[in-house]
Amino acid sequence: MLGYVASSSNGAIAGVTVSVLNSTNSVVATTTSDSSGLYFFPLTRNLTLGAGYTVKVTLPKGYKSSTPASQAFTWQANEVTLRNFVLN
């Protein structure tokens, strides 16, 4: 699973925490965006085949919202490329 975190002016935002939550909203994985805004989850062993998950960002200080607010997917043991999270 991978994607980017950017500002509304298309600038990369480093150090943003991105989390994968299961159907009970428990965190099953977290990562942090790098200097280019890229985040990716290298380990997927905590995910269950066929289960639904939600990806969300933790808004850093100075930001009020994220578009999208979250992104849902069903784990099929394949690469998942998510839309950019744009922070405002």
Image (cartoon, rainbow, N blue to C red):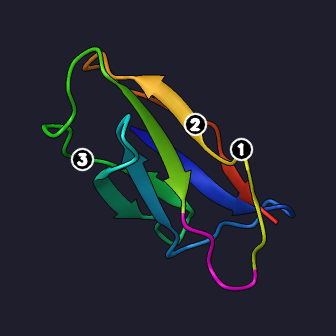
The amino acid on which the numbered mark 3 sits, given as a three-letter code, is Pro
Give the alpha-carbon distance from disc 3 to disc 2, as whole Å.
Answer: 18 Å
The amino acid on which the numbered mark 2 sits, given as a three-letter code, is Gln
Residue 42, horizontal then vertical, whole percent: 24, 47
Among numbered discs 3 and 1, the one appearing first in the sequence = 3
Residue 26, horizontal then vertical, whole percent: 33, 50
Does the magenta run of residues contain 75? no
Of 34 and 71, nearer the camera is: 71
Q: Is residue 28 left or right of residue 46?
A: right
Q: Which residue is mark 1?
A: 68
Q: Which residue is mark 2?
A: 71
Residue 27, horizontal then vertical, whole percent: 32, 53
Q: Which residue is mark 3?
A: 42
Among numbered discs 3 and 2, the one appearing first in the sequence = 3
- Viewport quadrant of the N terminus: top left
Q: Secondary structure at mark 1?
A: loop
- Viewport quadrant of the C terminus: bottom right
Q: Secondary structure at mark 2?
A: strand
Q: Is residue 33 left or right of residue 85?
A: left
What residue is rendered at 33% in x and 22% in y?
75
* Extreme residue toward the left, this view: 45
Residue segment shown in magenta: 58-62
User: Which of the two marks, 3 or 1, is nearer to us in this view?
Assistant: 1
Above or below: residue 88 compared with residue 27: below
The amino acid on which the numbered mark 1 sits, given as a three-letter code, is Pro
Residue 28, horizontal then vertical, whole percent: 26, 49
- Look at the numbered discs 2 and 1 and tell me whether their residues touch, using CB distance below 8 Å: yes
